Amino acid sequence: MDRVADRIAETLAAAGIRHAFGMPGGEVVTFIDALERAGIGFVLARNETAAAMMAAGAHAVTGAPGLLVTTLGPGLANAVNGIADACQERAALIVVSGVVERAVRGRYTHQVLDHAALLHPLVKASFEIEPEGAVAITARALGLATAGPYGPVHLDLSPAVAAMPALAEPAVPPAPLIHPSYISASRSIRELRARLVAAKRPVLLAGYEALRAGAGPIITQMAVEGGMPVLTTYKAKGLLDETHPMALGGCGLSPLADAILLPFLDQADLVILAGYDPIEMRGNWLGRLHDPDRIVEITDWPSDHGMHRAGTVLAGPVLPLLKAVASALQIVPYWPGSEIAQVRAALDDAFTGPAAWGPHSVIAALEAFLPPDAIVTVDSGAHRILLSQKLRVRQPGGLLQSSGFCTMGAALPLAIGAATEVKGRAIVAVMGDGGLEMTLGELGTLRDQGLGLVALVLQDESLALIELKQRQAGLAMTGVRLGATDYPSIARAFGGTGIAVDDAPSLTAALEAAFRSDRFTLIAARINSQDYVGRI
Ligand SMILES: Cc1ncc(C[n+]2csc(CCOP(=O)(O)OP(=O)(O)O)c2C)c(N)n1
């Protein structure tokens, strides 16, 4: 006999979902059973917020929506930060929570919360699944989650409904989306092409939606054949291999990089924003791209903010629009002087470390070691800003992080989610000691899932980013010092390998050993938080 839960699970599996992440409770055991029967493996996390980010990591590498399963009340409440992260990171996430049976809901109080109200500002919609239309509502949730901008959708499912016999209901396959090619003939495309032909100093600033649209090859062509310099947000790093001479790297959070990049952008006579979502940008960018004569935006949806203002907005699918525009790229080189090389040199210089050992050399050693198709995840903090500016990402999707929401505790779960789905690629989670200590329990998830990934903690015994802010404000260091945790012992206690390193050759040796091992490795690179001062 098929249960309602089975039909829901089949609908989720048909959308390409292969794993669910979460923490069970009595209210979701039937649903988890149905998931496993439908071929969706349940990954037990140690914390629901981490589980939501694991689902986001899985989503980032497969493109299928992530799936989070929580129990009612405390389970869902504990996922709130992870769901907020999916909201601000534009991640398609289906959240299924248990809920108290309707029959007793009006009288029963234990663990009873209004789930929809709790999640109201974070999710695109919250539905309760009924036996009638269970497939249709699940399909609707999938459709909403993957409508741009992507985001989380919540479904309540009571144990009684989950266990009921399924009613006859047709499957609801997603309608294929077709992007017609008429756009290449449209007036606005012709105009933009004409502007590209006339431009002397154009720049492409690409964001996450360009990455999601698969625009890496066309952007690479624009840079390599068309001589177009390319700048990206942090999440879009790697759209153009960042070792290429036309790659200007990432931008968004670093005042040091902004001091180089914003004056450079002021020199551009045409700035094309492609799939660019300014949720990743900090205050320096507020109002900076407000020049209608120079700014053209290619976007899937109209903006609802005041961060930038384009004179022309091409609203539509980013990939075909970019392709239509790219055909007009100049043969004559843009930027006839040495401006691009100078900006690259200035950025290199700005993010060169003060000493032979420190956060800068950790990132340099990591980059030298990693294969081009590696996936790096990075947490929030001073280390993240430095890494996002310094690490040259070789492929789209090569760097995952929480960059719109900037939550701590993202790197380890994102890496676990990615490693659950992708085999045979090097995956490294880079974090500060503050972020690691928020998610230490997930080392148990790593062990139990048999994931041999590498966690690299930049151990400075400080919440360095906040320490920097206190320093800049002339305040005392309060509430930012962390003790000297013995991470190698912790890693061993969780069944992994742990090692502390204090110089670059030892780090390289530790990375080499880590990638030979099928157990997880936690590498603690002991650094000094002072090395970030004035350098991010
Ligand atoms: C969940 C959450 N809490 C607090 C913050 C504010 N915050 C941003 S970075 C940071 C310090 C991070 O310290 P650590 O992980 O050690 O990294 P570091 O800055 O030392 O590189 C804090 C507290 C946040 N972004 N997210």
Image (cartoon, rainbow, N blue to C red):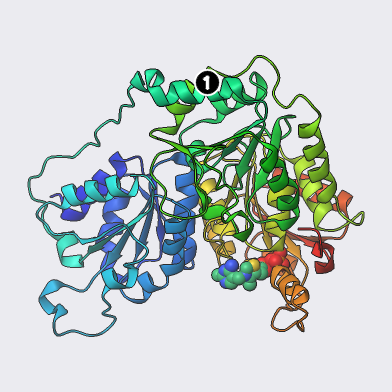
Residue 402 in view of the camera: yes
- Give the residue drawn at x 69%, y 15%: 332
Image location (x, y in percent) of residue 279: 51, 54
Quadrant for ligand 1 reads bottom right
State the image coordinates of residue 351 (x, y, percent, origin top left). 81, 50
In this picture, residue 164 sits left or right of residue 249: left
Q: Residues within 10 Å of mark 1 (few under 14, many from 20)?
A: some
User: Is 282 or 408 nearer to us in this picture?
Assistant: 282
Q: Quadrant of residue 477?
A: bottom right
Q: Is mark 1 within 8 Å of ligand 1?
A: no
Position of residue 333 measured from the top left corner of the image (x, y, whole percent): 71, 19
> In the image as oriented, which residue stretches furthest toward the top?
331
- Please tell me which residue is depicted at 10% across the width and 44% down the height of the picture: 169
Name the side, left or right, on which 406 lies relative to 10. Answer: right
Q: In the rendered view, tell whether residue 484 sits above or below residue 387.
A: below
Amino acid of disc 1: Ala
Say which element carries label 1: helix
**Image quarter of residue 532:** bottom right
Q: Nearer the viewer, residue 530 or 476?
A: 476
Q: Residue furthest front?
A: 293
Specify whether residue 493 is in view: no
Q: Residue at x 82, y 50 (%)?
A: 350
